Amino acid sequence: MSRTKARAALLQELEEAMRRSSAQGVLYGQTVANVAGIANSDLECMDILYLEGRVPAGRLAEVTGLTTGAITGVIDRLEKAGLVRRERDEADRRKVFIAVVPETAMKIGQLYVPMQQAMEKVFGAYSDEELRLLLRFANEGYKGVLAATEALKSLLDTPPEKRPDLKLKKLRPNP
Amino acid sequence: MSRTKARAALLQELEEAMRRSSAQGVLYGQTVANVAGIANSDLECMDILYLEGRVPAGRLAEVTGLTTGAITGVIDRLEKAGLVRRERDEADRRKVFIAVVPETAMKIGQLYVPMQQAMEKVFGAYSDEELRLLLRFANEGYKGVLAATEALKSLLDTPPEKRPDLKLKKLRPNP
DNA sequence: CTAAATCTCTTAGCGACTAAGATATATATC
DNA sequence: GATATATATCTTAGTCGCTAAGAGATTTAG
């Protein structure tokens, strides 16, 4: 292989490297949840709240893919831990907005310090211009994954007998 | 903010973008598991097997952070689905190596096609040199996250009363 | 004003996880 | 070689979070 590596090989290596690092990211998250003493989904919801701010309960179900019943449980636990607050929407009194309690949620945030430090160190080796490239990639990658998720989900909606053959012995009914 | 964005702001934006895209990556994985009709941890183990090849059962416990008991269940389900095979190590007959069954596992692989296509499209917009930068970052990022995970885990080993104060009402005992 | 739709919560039942210990095999010590 | 300790996986009992289904409360449509 020449010094300018063949593009196909480069792409494959890249795919594998990203897969590996994102798998490790998942493990980091699991560890955070463990240390904090909350369930994985609970942490996932905290993350959504961090990114989106105050959101209605149903939105959490939508984004996480959990049922609304499960979300009720998540919120119960998070509320009991003092991490979030339920706030009834006065305009539409069916809705329940979930808001983080910043003072308490901060303590979860601290568990991301090792990660932030590691990343700071990594980023330190890049120029501003290179970082802008990484940012562009992160944003485009996000959109790509989002689209791919929708594509895969739509496959779930197509009647099973019409799906691209996936003859796996089914262990669980797929919804 | 000037055209050459202040580095601190750039870093923060980058952190958020990566967080967002990796969260979406998690959701993609959940969707794959749903469509395939297997549990999330089962898919995670398949992923490890894909990356590491044939590994002993205990290694799966180690990497996933599950107990060996849980892993037994994972393997039982995967084996029943025809995705992996148990192979006793002849040299050390306590060990059970887990190997994917390529013909069957391929069908899971197909569920990553939407993701691969999305990524191909994204990568298409980058030069070889830029891709090499992304590869370098993915590799360094992996090492960083791995180190951060270890750092966080070691925090778990330090006696609770000596940990950097994390006064969360504990809902679950942390191991 | 009634009917249908929307949003959250409740309940019953189930599947995956942990903790603890059982089993089988390997290694170290005498 | 026999015994003790260590290692690797499996088993069991009990717990927790999830889904499915539907109830309750409120809003929107006709």
Image (cartoon, coloured by chain):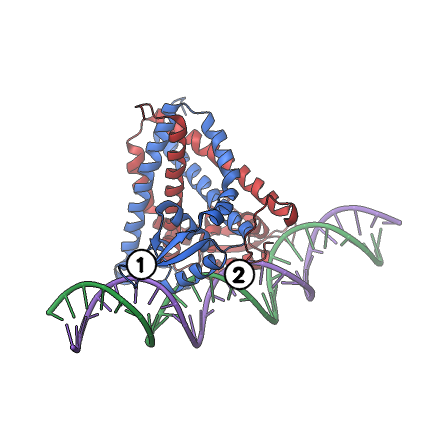
Chain colours: A blue, B red, C purple, D green
Q: Chain of mark 1?
A: A
Is residue A141 visible in the rendered structure shown here? yes
Type of the residue with mark 2? Gly
Q: Find the distance from the CA under tag 2 to the CA under tag 1.
A: 44 Å
Provide the secondary structure element on which disc 2 rests: helix
Quick one: A102 or C28, which is closer to the camera? A102
According to the picture, the residue beneath numbered tag 2 turns out to be B73
Disc assigned to residue A15: none
Crowd class of label 2 (few under 14; some 14 to 19; many from 20; radius 10 Å): few
Q: Quadrant of the N terminus of chain A?
A: top left
Type of the residue with mark 1? Asp
Q: Chain of mark 2?
A: B
The residue sitting at 46% across, 40% down in the picture is A20
x, y percent for residue A89: 31, 58
Quick one: B145 or A117, which is closer to the camera? A117
The residue sitting at 50% across, 56% down in the picture is A81
Is residue A169 visible in the rendered structure shown here? no
According to the picture, the residue beneath numbered tag 1 turns out to be A89
Q: Nearer the viewer, mark 2 or mark 1?
A: 1
Residues at circles 2 and 1 in contact by the CB criterion of under 8 Å: no
Q: In the rendered view, does A105 fall on the left or right side of B129?
A: right
Quick one: A13 or B161, which is closer to the camera? B161
Q: Quadrant of the C terminus of chain A?
A: bottom left
Crowd class of label 1 (few under 14; some 14 to 19; many from 20; radius 10 Å): few
Tally of numbered tags: 2
Q: Is residue B149 above or below residue B74?
A: above
x, y percent for residue B122: 30, 36
Provide the secondary structure element on which disc 1 rests: loop
Q: In the rendered view, does C16 fall on the left or right side of B11?
A: right
x, y percent for residue C28: 79, 46
Q: In the rendered view, does A6 fall on the left or right side of B75?
A: left
x, y percent for residue A131: 38, 28
